[in-house]
Image (cartoon, grey):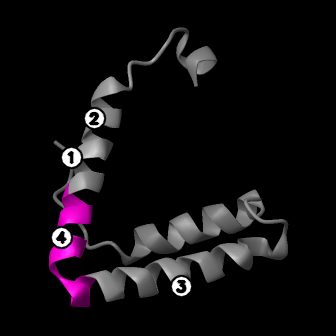
Amino acid sequence: MNRLLDGPLDLSDLMESARQFDAQLAEVLAQNRKVANYVKRLEAKDQEADEVSPGGGPEGELPPSQELVAEIERFLRQQPPGPSPA
């Protein structure tokens, strides 16, 4: 990414926000067993989905570009029309 933007990126704010989010999430999960169980189920489901990667390729490999474009087009068609640009 640094090569693309011709210079280093300062990610310190992003890292701090991520740390704060993780701390807040841990606090919520410690206080609410129901939410904690729900999060565990979501994480397990996500892990299963990662094991069966999209496009049938190796784990972490992106599907072919045509599939990605088709999915983006489907997403955009499903969005409600917004105000037209001025």
Q: Residue 39: say if magenta.
A: no
Disc 1 target residue: 85
What distance separates the C-alpha of mark 4 from that of mark 1? 41 Å
Of badges 4 and 1, the one in the foreground is 4
Q: Looking at the image, is 78 positioned above or below residue 67?
A: below
Q: Which mark is residue 28?
A: 4
Label 4 neighbourhood size at 10 Å, few (<14), some (14-19), many (20+)? few
What distance separates the C-alpha of mark 4 from that of mark 3? 21 Å
* Range of magenta residues: 24-35
Do the CB atoms of the residues marked 2 and 1 lie less than 8 Å apart?
Answer: no
- Ranked by sequence position, the earlier of labels 2 and 1 is 2
Disc 2 target residue: 16
User: What secondary structure is the magenta-colored segment mainly?
Assistant: helix
User: Which SS class for mark 3?
Assistant: helix
Q: Is residue 22 left or right of residue 47?
A: left
- Ranked by sequence position, the earlier of labels 4 and 2 is 2
Q: Looking at the image, is 43 positioned above or below residue 22?
A: below
Residue at 26%, 63% (x, y): give it. Answer: 26
What distance separates the C-alpha of mark 3 from that of mark 2? 28 Å
Of badges 4 and 2, the one in the foreground is 4
User: Which SS class for mark 4?
Assistant: helix
